[in-house]
């Protein structure tokens, strides 16, 4: 399947993933008073599980496995944690953190998923 079609499907899945991520982030950050790093990581864990299974089935039509899940979660979790950590260190507002993470995870996540996690 062409990369353009795969990326379009990845973006659609990413929209739902982003809604899940942002909702959990704001809930944990505002209701529990957690740091951005923790809020971003926890939100990521909820959203990444959805994203992994949706992208495996809908985007890449690829079987799932524990190994693939761990590869996906490890990479994206590290990206999430460092984004939140950097935002905390730099005093970046939470909304900016989410916008930045959403953009960077879309691009890097697609490349990593396409060529590492769900490669044919």
Image (cartoon, rainbow, N blue to C red):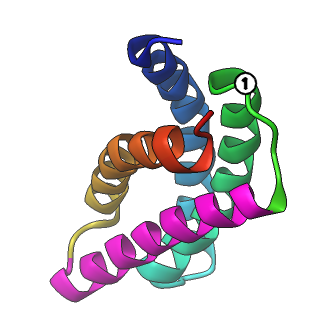
Residue 10 in the image: above or below residue 22: above
In the orientation shown, which residue stands out farthest toward the bottom? Answer: 89
Q: Is residue 76 magenta?
A: yes
Q: Residue furthest toward the left?
A: 90
Q: Quadrant of the C terminus?
A: top right
Quarter of the view holding residue 3? top left
Q: Please state which of residues 44 and 9 is positioned toward the viewer in this rendering.
A: 9
- Residue annotated with mark 1: 61
Q: Nearer the viewer, residue 81 or 97?
A: 81
Q: Residue at x 38, y 47 (%)?
A: 102
Q: Which residues are magenta?
A: 67-91
Tag 1 secondary structure: loop
Instruction: Tell me: 12 left or right of 65.
Output: left
Can residue 70 be seen by looking at this rendering?
Answer: yes
Taking the spot 37% from the left edge, 75% from the top edge, the residue there is 84
**Residue 85 place in picture, x, y as percent:** 34, 83
């Amino acid at each position: 399947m062409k990369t353009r079609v795969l990326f379009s499907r990845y973006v659609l899945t990413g929209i739902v993933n982003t809604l899940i991520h942002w909702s959990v982030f704001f809930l944990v950050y505002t209701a529990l008073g957690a740091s951005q790093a923790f809020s971003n990581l926890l939100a990521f864990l909820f959203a990444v599980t959805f994203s992994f299974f949706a992208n495996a089935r809908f985007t890449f039509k690829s079987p799932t496995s524990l190994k693939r899940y761990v590869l996906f979660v490890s990479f994206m979790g590290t990206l999430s944690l460092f984004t939140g950590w950097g935002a905390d260190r730099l005093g970046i507002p939470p909304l900016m953190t989410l916008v930045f993470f959403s953009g960077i995870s879309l691009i890097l996540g697609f490349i990593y998923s396409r060529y590492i996690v769900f490669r044919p």
